[in-house]
Structures are given as C-alpha cells and as structure tokens.
C-alpha cells in the first residue's frame, strides 16, 4: 500500500489543478467514468504529467486500471519508482 504522504500530494494536485472539491474526493473515489467525479482524458494527461515530473514515473500508455483512484495511482507509483 502506498504511503499517506504520496496519496495526500496526489489529492492536493487533483483538487488544486483539476478543480475537484476536496470534500468529495477520498483516496478510493473513482476518478473517471459516469458514476464518478467526472475527470476526462485531458485530466488523465495532467495526472500523467504531474506523476512524471514529481516522481519520475512514466504513466504514458499505462492501463486504465491504474487510474481508477488515488489509491491505484499511488500504488503504481510505489511499484515503479
């Protein structure tokens, strides 16, 4: 399981840069799709850019199962640093 500091940084980025309200975003909240907070493919590119710049982990072309939530993004970063 990825550490809390990493998840907090991801949440802060998603809230401040992508305009998601912090009170509706938990670490296991689904980020993409109809029943979610409604991020789209442009938002995923922003996340990819942030992760690459901040952690040196390239998520380009990574399967969508790694973009389900902050938990899954953080786990991918931890596994690939």
Image: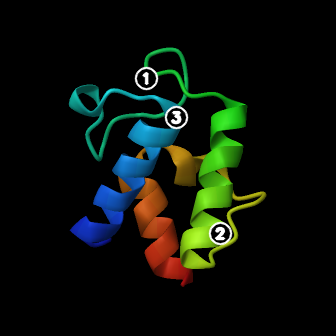
Q: Are marks 2 and 1 in contact (CB under 8 Å)?
A: no
Q: Is residue 34 left or right of residue 3?
A: right
- For the point 41% across and 29% down, the residue is 20
To which residue does mark 2 refer?
Answer: 52
- Tell me: residue 50, above or below residue 5: above
**Label number found at residue 18:** 3
Q: Is residue 1 at all visible to an observer of this figure?
A: no
Q: Quadrant of residue 35?
A: top left
Circle 2 sits in a helix, a strand or a loop, which is it?
A: helix
- In terms of depth relative to the viewer, which is nearer, 4 or 33? 4
Distance in Å between CA atoms under marks 2 and 1: 23 Å
Distance in Å between CA atoms under marks 2 and 3: 17 Å
To which residue does mark 1 refer?
Answer: 37
Circle 1 sits in a helix, a strand or a loop, which is it?
A: loop
Question: The N terminus lies in which quarter of the figure?
Answer: bottom left
Coordinates of residue 25 in the picture (x, y in percent):
30, 34
Counting residues from the N terminus, which is met first, the one under dot 2 or under dot 1? Answer: 1
Q: Quadrant of residue 55?
A: bottom right
- For the point 46% across and 29% down, the residue is 19
Badge 2 density bin: few <14, some 14–19, many ≥20, Cα 10 Å: some
């Amino acid at each position: 399981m990825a550490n809390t500091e990493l998840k907090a940084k991801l949440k802060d980025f998603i809230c401040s840069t992508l305009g998601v309200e912090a009170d509706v975003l938990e670490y296991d909240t689904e980020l993409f799709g109809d029943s979610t907070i409604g991020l789209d493919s442009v938002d995923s590119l922003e996340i990819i850019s942030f992760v690459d710049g901040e952690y040196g982990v390239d998520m380009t072309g990574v399967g969508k199962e790694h973009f389900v939530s902050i938990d899954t993004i953080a786990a991918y970063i931890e596994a690939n640093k």
